């Protein structure tokens, strides 16, 4: 179906997701992103924010991260690729969960 990868530092993490083509467009990415962020914030109490760097032309992925509660922080160059940086803070996640997102 796919995979989620989380790379953690002291107070932040980077999330990457890959969904197999046959499973795209079914909401699995949003679910996997949300659940992974809940897990990582529970596992690491010192973690403040989870980042995602998504290529500018990958609108489907951007939509999935928006759906999971991430906020765009604008365009950036990440690993020599033009990307949009997204972030989800611990507080954003708490607010989203209390609203039932």
Image (cartoon, rainbow, N blue to C red):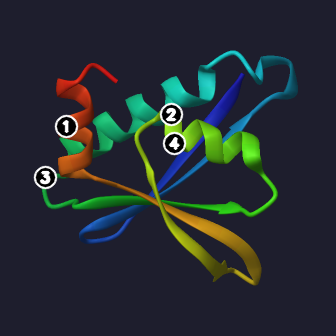
Q: Dividing the picture into quarters, in which one does residue 23 lie?
A: top right
Q: Which mark is residue 66?
A: 4
Placement of 64 over or under 77, stated as above or below: above
User: Tag 3 or tag 2, which sits nearer the N-term?
Assistant: 3
Q: Are marks 2 and 4 in contact (CB under 8 Å)?
A: yes
Q: Secondary structure at mark 4?
A: helix
Q: Position of residue 1 (x, y in %)?
A: 72, 21
User: Tag 1 or tag 4, which sits nearer the N-term?
Assistant: 4
User: Tag 1 or tag 3, which sits nearer the N-term?
Assistant: 3
Q: Label 1, label 2: how many angstroms apart (C-alpha)?
A: 14 Å
Between 26 and 66, the one nearer to me in the picture: 66
Residue plotted at (14% across, 61% down)? 46
Q: Label 4, label 1: how many angstroms apart (C-alpha)?
A: 14 Å
Q: Which mark is residue 45?
A: 3
User: Tag 2 or tag 1, which sits nearer the N-term?
Assistant: 2
Q: Secondary structure at mark 3?
A: loop
Which is closer to the viewer, label 4 or label 3?
Answer: 4
Q: Secondary structure at mark 2?
A: helix
Which is closer to the viewer, label 3 or label 1?
Answer: 1
Q: Label 2, label 3: how many angstroms apart (C-alpha)?
A: 24 Å
Residue placed under numbered mark 2 in the picture: 67
Q: Residue furthest right?
A: 21
Which is closer to the viewer, label 2 or label 3?
Answer: 2
Q: Position of residue 16 (x, y in %)?
A: 59, 51
User: Tag 3 or tag 4, which sits nearer the N-term?
Assistant: 3
Residue placed under numbered mark 1 in the picture: 95
Q: Mark 3: few, some, or many residues within 10 Å (few <14, many ≥20)?
A: few
Q: Mark 2: few, some, or many residues within 10 Å (few <14, many ≥20)?
A: some
């Amino acid at each position: 179906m796919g995979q989620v990868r989380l790379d953690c530092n002291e107070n932040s993490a980077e999330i990457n997701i890959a969904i197999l083509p046959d499973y795209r467009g079914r909401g699995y990415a949003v679910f996997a992103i949300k659940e992974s962020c809940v897990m990582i914030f529970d596992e690491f109490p010192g973690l403040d924010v989870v980042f995602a760097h998504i290529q500018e032309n990958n609108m489907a992925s951007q939509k999935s991260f928006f759906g999971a509660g991430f906020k765009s922080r604008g365009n950036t160059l990440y690993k020599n690729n033009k990307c949009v940086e997204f972030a989800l803070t611990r507080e954003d996640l708490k607010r989203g969960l209390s609203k039932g997102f």
